[in-house]
Structure formats: C-alpha cells, structure tokens
Image (cartoon, rainbow, N blue to C red):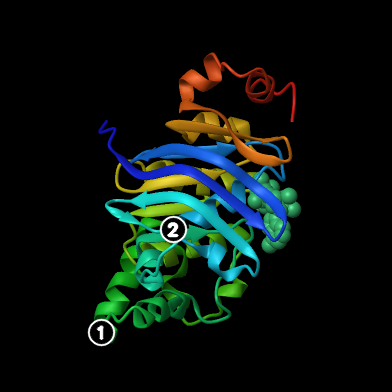
Amino acid sequence: MDREPVICIESVGVRYGQAEALRNVTMPIYRGCITAIVGPSGCGKSTFLNCLNRMTDMIEGCQVAGRIRIDDAQIIGRRIDLLALRRRVGMIFQKPNPFPLSIRSNLTFPLKEHGVRGRRRREARARRALEQVGLWKEVRDRLDEPALALSGGQQQRLCLARALVLEPRILLLDEPCSALDPMASAVVEDLIGSLRGRYTVVIVTHNLAQARRVADDLAVFWKVDGAGTVIERGPASQVFASPKHELAAAYVSGRRG
Ligand code: ADP
Ligand code: MG
C-alpha cells in the first residue's frame, strides 16, 4: 500500500481556556489507510479529531497551536475556507445525529448547501451514497419518511452516507459504534473496513478488538503531566505485538486503562 502521508500533524497543542488538553502531538496519517486512535477517556482523542477539520473553531476558548498540513495546505492559525475543508474532511460522531428531516433530505440538503445544482443530480448522488452504506435496499421505498424513525444502526449508516455524499477524501469517526448494539456495530465496522484504500480514515475507538480488526495504523494517546499526547504509534500489528512504551503495552494488552 501507498504510504504517502496525507495529513501531517506537527507539535500540536490544544487548550480550553487555561486547561491544556493536548501537548506536542506529532504524527503522520497515511493516505488510504485506517488509523485508529485509542486511549483512556479524557486523554484528548476527540479534541485531536476536532482539530483535523477545525471543529475546534466552534468551541469558545479553544486554542490550537502547531501545524497541521492536509495535502499541501496548512489548516491551523490562518483563514481558510472552512466549508471546503469540511467537504474534504467529513466527520461522524458517537451518537447518530441525522437531521430531523426525511431520509432523502439528509443527503440532498448537504448537497444543496455545497452548491450541487439540479434535483435529479442530487438524487442520483444520494442513491449512490445509500448504496455505498448498504442502506438503499432497506430505505428505497421510504425515502420521504423521517430519518429519526430509522434504527440506531441505520441512522449511523445514514450519517456515514451523509458524509460520503459530499465525496470527502478523509473521514473522521469518533467512536462511531459505541452507541450501537453488537449487530449494528458489526455492520458499521465492516462498512468502515470497506472504505480502506478509497478514503483516509481516522477512527477513535475505545474498543481494542475493533482497532485490531480494522486499523492499519494505531496511535495510543495518554494523559502525561496533565495533558494528552501520543505515547506510541506505528503500524497496528507492530503496536499490538511489541509496544515500546510501558503504559501503551499495558493498555493494548488490556491490563490498564
Ligand atoms: P477523549 O475524547 O479522549 O475522552 P476529550 O478530547 O473529549 O478526550 O477531552 C480531553 C480533555 O479536554 C478533557 O480533560 C476534557 O475535560 C477537556 N475538554 C474537552 N472538551 C472541552 C470543552 N469543550 N471545554 C473545556 N474542556 C474540554
Ligand atoms: Mg471522546
């Protein structure tokens, strides 16, 4: 597989007011790979993801320092086109959050917002996104029903479709399966695995077995001296087999965390 870094994170630090959430985070994220972020709660995993599409801008008092380069553009500390960034870097959260609209509108509305003209064109893209997440057959006869009437697992797949419909290159997933039952979780996890190669995926998960199954690369975050940082990273197989850091070793073996 191509090991070209698509996101370069260098010396990133994040503060919420006086509180330091992340310190000195440096890591590459490789194109077409699935990078899993693991670590105990509160160690800054969500904060890290939020930096990658500048969701941190929405949080009052949140300050990000350091450098994050996506493709050839620095995205930190300068004025950039945030709508364009978020089109390229889609995001899915722990709790499925479809818009309180019809299933169809959940997909056609973002397309409209992003300037895609023509109802038929938008509907064709909506269908393709639903097919990609394996929902088309389940919902084709009820596209005008409320998205919130779908099951949790279906809602999460719809949220994934809503991100995919904008044809992003990078997907950020923050514990996308942890609010789902085991069956729905397995479906979403398989779907994430199927994105490998076509998208660059960064997934936060507290489920180590899931990280082992889906990740190409693994980063272990830990709170050190009051702020989260990366204590171990590399190809997932290597980090699981022979972690160098004592805490990372204890964590990935399930002895700690
Ligand atoms: P994780 O996702 O690993 O559980 P978070 O990134 O959510 O960790 O949180 C990292 C630290 O930043 C925690 O100490 C948390 O309390 C703090 N934090 C997160 N979000 C905010 C916020 N909006 N305002 C203030 N502090 C926050
Ligand atoms: Mg979190």
Q: What amino acid does circle 2 point to?
A: Ile
Q: Residues within 10 Å of mark 2 (few under 14, many from 20)?
A: some
Q: Which residue is mark 1?
A: 117
Is the residue indicated by label 2 positioned so its CB lies within 8 Å of ligand 1? no
Residue 242 position within the rendered picture, expressed as x and y whole percent measured from the top left: 54, 13
Question: Residue at coordinates 55% horizontally, 76% vertically from top-left?
Answer: 99
The nearer-to-camera label among 1 and 2 is 2
Kindly tell me whether residue 136 is visible in this rendering.
no
Residue 231 higher or lower than 151, as above or below: above
Residue 58 position within the rendered picture, expressed as x and y whole percent measured from the top left: 57, 70
Q: Say what secondary structure mark 2 lies in.
A: loop
Q: Which residue is mark 2?
A: 76
Residue found at the far top of this picture = 242
Q: Residues within 10 Å of mark 1 (few under 14, many from 20)?
A: few
Question: Residue at coordinates 25% horizontally, 86% vertically from top-left?
Answer: 118
Marks 1 & 2, CB-CB < 8 Å contact: no
Quadrant holding the C terminus: top right
Residue 154 higher or lower than 184, as above or below: below
Residue 103 position within the rendered picture, expressed as x and y whole percent measured from the top left: 48, 75
Q: Is 27 displayed left or right of 94 in the figure?
A: left
Question: Residue at coordinates 60% horizontally, 30% vertically from top-left?
Answer: 209
Of 141 and 67, nearer the camera is: 67
Q: Say what secondary structure mark 1 lies in.
A: loop
Of 81 and 255, nearer the camera is: 81
Q: What amino acid does circle 1 point to?
A: Arg
Question: Residue at coordinates 58% horizontally, 80% vertically from top-left?
Answer: 100
Quadrant holding the N terminus: top left
Mark 1–mark 2 distance (CA, rounded to whole Å) = 31 Å
Residue 234 higher or lower than 142, as above or below: above
Of 21 and 241, nearer the camera is: 21
